[in-house]
Amino acid sequence: MWIRSQNKQVLIDADKIEIFKSKRNEYIIGTRWGQRRSFMGLKTICYTLLGIYSTAEEAYKVMDMLQEHAEGINTVEKQIASFAGDYKRCFQMPPSEEREEGKK
């Protein structure tokens, strides 16, 4: 499934999407592509960031939206709408509602 990141800088064909909790207590939606160990033996997860959300509930809501979009791609109605230009096959990650409110 094609996904465009929240900041619009990444366009990726993702097949496995996860939620990670950051050290700043933000919830990151992304795709894991590897792990590596530092010279001190610490394990680092390497992932492509798709979106950052303030709460787990908000991140899960976006995951539900991703699932609905992925399931909809294969329906006949969505395929017909896609040919008519009414359905976008690429999912645009929505902004974080709470992070946007904090900027105001």
Image (spheres, helix red, strand yellow):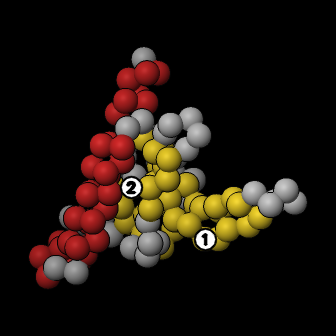
- Quadrant of the drawing holding the N terminus: bottom left
Above or below for 6 versus 74: above
Q: Which numbered disc, 1 or 2, marks the residue that appears first in the sequence?
A: 1
Mark 1 and mark 2 in contact? Answer it, CB < 8 Å: no
Q: Nearer the viewer, mark 1 or mark 2?
A: 1
Displayed quadrant of residue 83: bottom left
Residue extending furthest toward the right: 39
Q: Determine whether the residue tagged by mark 2 lies in a helix, strand or loop.
A: strand
Along the line of sight, the residue nearer the viewer: 18 or 49:
18
The percent coordinates of residue 43 (x first, y second) are 71, 60
Question: Mark 2: which amino acid?
Answer: Gln
Residue 21 in the figure: left or right of residue 98: right
Residue at horizontal 23 percent and vertical 73 percent from the top: 71
Please report the residue visible at 67 percent of the width from the left and 68 percent of the height from the top. Answer: 35
As measured in the structure, the alpha-carbon distance from the residue carrying label 1 to the one carrying label 2 is: 20 Å
Viewer-proximal residue, 2 or 29? Answer: 29
Residue under label 2 = 92
Q: Position of residue 42 (x, y in %)?
A: 75, 57
Q: Is residue 45 left or right of residue 95?
A: right
**Image check: 71 left or right of 9?**
left
Residue 56 locus on image (x, y percent) = 36, 43
Q: Residue at x 65, y 62 (%)?
A: 46
- 61 over 2 or under it: above or below: above
The reply to whether residue 90 is in sight is yes
Disc 1, SS: strand
| Residue lying furthest top | 104
Q: Residues within 10 Å of mark 1 (few under 14, many from 20)?
A: few
Question: In this rendering, does residue 50 appear at all?
Answer: no
Horizontal side of 2 relative to 8 (left or right) equals: left
Three-letter amino acid code at disc 1?
Trp
Q: Residues within 10 Å of mark 2 (few under 14, many from 20)?
A: some
Residue 34 screen position, x and y as percent: 64, 71
